[in-house]
Amino acid sequence: MSRLLQDTLLTTASRYPDRTALIAGDVQMNYGEVAHYACRLAHALRAHGVTRGDRVAIFMDNTWQCALSIYGVLLAGGVFVTVNAQTKTDKLAFILRDADARVLLSEPHFTRVFGPVAEQMPALRILCTPESNALPAGVENLDDTLTNMPPTPPPQLTITLDLAALIYTSGTTGAPKGVMHSHHSLLFALDSINEYLGFTQDDRLFSALPLNFGYGLFQWLSAVRAGATLVLERSFTYPAQVFKRMHDEAVTSFASVPTVFAMMLAQDAKQPLRFPSVRLITNAAAALPAEFIPGIRRLFPRASLYKMYGQTECIRSAYLNPNLAEIKLESVGCAIPGTELLLLGENGQPVAQGEVGCLHVRGPHVMLGYWNQPEKTAEVLVPGPLPGEFLLKSGDLFRQDAEGDFYFVARSDEIIKSRGEKVSPAEVENAIYSLPAVQDVVVIGIPDPLLGEAVCAFVAAREGEELSVQQIKRICSERLENYMVPKHVLLLPELPRTVNGKLSRKLIMEQCAASLAELN
């Protein structure tokens, strides 16, 4: 029985030591090698003062060292804090201070980012993977610290209720928040996800998602839990190389986000892509436009498509049965196994079927709270139906159909009130996405003296495609009520994203502040 997250690695390694666990670039490691490295790192971290509950930051690219470091930190009794490789100095400094990290695991080419922080935090120990050049002063060679460290687990003092991870949100509004997950919450989410996706030891999961991102992290955790293989890519920067690896490694599972699917469909239009070995596809982090599905079917002719919904605060909330993917095009499905989803109105009472309510999540996968932020925690962890129980208030508005499946409407703070009517940005975005030339869309409301708020659409076309404001307004007029048709449409070369690849309303508004001012 696995009570701790690291138990999944130790159990799999004891059963299948020679089975391939990870393929990352030119590096291929079996489970025995992964466990030995993680155990040696755990002893090294203990030697550097890491004790039960201490936070260890992992600031690395999507590499084998990053993946193995997660288990090394856990085996040391620590709490892993994965930091996106694109993070800049100020944000890294905030995370390291906020988490009160004892050790930073990184790579020498990030010295320009963590260097200024290290000068301000002299107690922080920094261990770096070796490179050809000498490491900066005060930075230790990670490989040297592993020398003579035993490849067996140190004594485990942690229990399942202890903190396992601090996962910092992207911080698109205000400072980043550290989401606290225990071993119990992560293990429960892991087993629930693996149950409905049906991963086995024969699967070969592919991921180019950042390991600091809950969706990317769980590709690795799921593979280890199932005794499967993870094919890990740093990014989709070189698509042709990625596609070749997917073919060469005969991957069976492909996890991605709408942005990547859009890029693949654009590539497929130029030169057909086919991945016949893939048996399942997952989409999370952002809604998958219904118009993408026929193209995805061509790319992955034998795959089942799982549309999913979740938040860092609970990892995953809902999934749609793949048999319904082309029947319930806009649905994210039902609650993941062992959990419950509730739609509550402003009065805290359940809404009627078909009515819009705020989604509340009930289950052992709900976070412990936000690190060092009790007031923000109290805003989202609200009393549940049982004494002493808390629900996660998602802040997202949904409706539910007669079969119990859920449909995203909007973020509660994103609803546009125009002409006295409520406009769902997601509904307008879906209408615009129906145009084949559209790559990305974000719809927001901007102040308007007559309308209250005017609907404004920011649109980026696919490379080589032509798109006009008239086309966009025409398709909206055909598909939407008059009050939902954008008053303003701004065509941009590309739309800005957060470090996790999500389209960002905040960044768009910042970058287009001058244009927006002219509209008012």
Image (cartoon, rainbow, N blue to C red):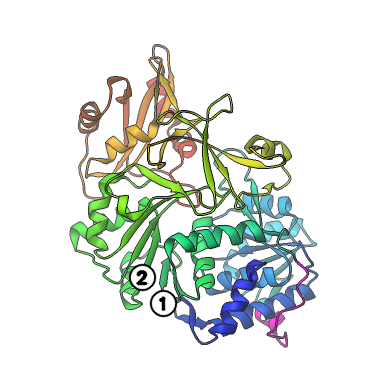
Residue found 46% across the figure and 41% down from its top: 504
For the residue pair 322 and 88, the one nearer the viewer reads as 322
Q: Residue type at mark 1?
A: Asp
Q: Where residue 424 appears, x then y in whole percent?
A: 39, 30
Residue 150 belongs to magenta span: yes
For the residue pair 368 and 263, the one nearer the viewer reads as 368
Q: Where residue 409 appears, x then y in whole percent?
A: 41, 34
Which residue reaches farthest top?
Answer: 450
1 or 2: mark nearer the eye: 1
Which type of secondary structure does the marked residue at label 2 adopt? Answer: loop
- Name the image quarter holding residue 146: bottom right
- Residue 252, disc: 2
Asked if residue 291 lies left or right of residue 458, the reply is left
Q: Quadrant of the C terminus?
A: top left
* Placement of 267 over or under 22, stated as above or below: above
- Residue 202, disc: 1
Q: Which residues are magenta?
A: 143-158
Residue found 30% across the figure and 68% down from its top: 240
